[in-house]
Image: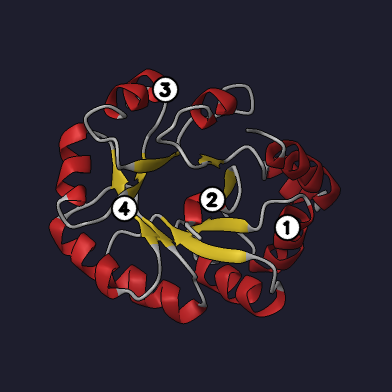
Amino acid sequence: MSLLDLAPVVPVVVVDDAAAAVPLARALVAGGLPVIEVTLRTDAALDAIRRIADEVPDAVVGAGTVRSAGDIAAAVAAGSRFLVSPGTTPSLLDALVDGGVPFLPGVATASEAMAVRERGITEMKFFPAEVAGGVPYLKALSGPLADVRFCPTGGIKPATAPAYLALPNVGCVGGTWLTPADALAAGDYGHIEKLALEASALR
C-alpha cells in the first residue's frame, strides 16, 4: 500500500527530547495516526526515530527535513521506514532512490513536479503548501499531472485539511498541529491522542 494511503494526516513532529518520543508515538498511534514523520531539525531526532522504531511496533516512523545523502544514511540506520525532503535536487533524488525505503521528494512548482515525474516517481510532498498556492494550485495541477499524487504540508490546519483531502491528487496531508509544544512540555499525551483521533476522522 502507498504511504499516502495509510492515514489522512501524517503528524510532522519536532522532538527536542528523545525521552518523549515513545509516549508521543504511542499517543498518535492510539489516536489512529500510525505514520509519523520526525523532522531532522534537532539533535534528538535520530535517537527519537530509533526509540520509536524499537519500541512502538505499530508506528510507521520516518524522517523529514532530509537534505543530503548523509541524512538519508543516518535516518535509515536509525530505523526510518520512509523519508521526506523539503525540496528536491538531482543529487538528493539520486540518494533517495538509492536509500532503499519509500520516500516523498518535496516539490513546490509544476516544473519541479515534472522533473521528479521524469524519474518515474509519482508520489511527492507539496511544500510549503499554503504559501505555495494551496488547494487552488494543487487543483490546477491535477489536469496536466493527472498521475501525480501529493502529501501537502506546511500551514495546514484542521479546518483547512478537508479541502485538501477532497482533491483527487491528494492522498494525505502533513500536520504540525498534532503535537503542540505546550502539550509536549507538560507530557500531556492524552491531549495529543485526542488531537490524533480528531485528525484520523478527517476525509
Percent across and percent down for residue 127 are: 36, 38
- How far apart marks 4 and 3 lie (CA) works out to 19 Å
> Callout 1: helix, strand or loop?
helix
As shown in the figure, which amino acid type bears the numbered disc 4? Pro
The residue that label 1 is drawn on is 29
Image height of 158 relative to 123, above or below? above
The image quarter containing residue 104 is: bottom left
The residue that label 4 is drawn on is 105
Crowdedness near tag 2: few (<14), some (14–19) or many (≥20) residues, C-alpha within 10 Å: few
Q: Which residue shows up at 30% across the image and 59% down it? A: 67
- Which is nearer the N-term, disc 2 or disc 3? 2
CB atoms at circles 2 and 4 under 8 Å apart? no
- Which is nearer the N-term, disc 2 or disc 1? 2
- How far apart marks 1 and 4 lie (CA) works out to 24 Å
- Which is nearer the N-term, disc 4 or disc 3? 4
Quadrant including the C terminus: top right
Q: Which residue shows up at 50% across the image and 78% down it? A: 78
As shown in the figure, which amino acid type bears the numbered disc 3? Val
Crowdedness near tag 4: few (<14), some (14–19) or many (≥20) residues, C-alpha within 10 Å: many
As shown in the figure, which amino acid type bears the numbered disc 1? Val
- Which is nearer the N-term, disc 2 or disc 4? 2
27 with respect to 36 (left or right): right
- How far apart marks 2 and 3 lie (CA) works out to 19 Å
CB atoms at circles 2 and 3 under 8 Å apart? no
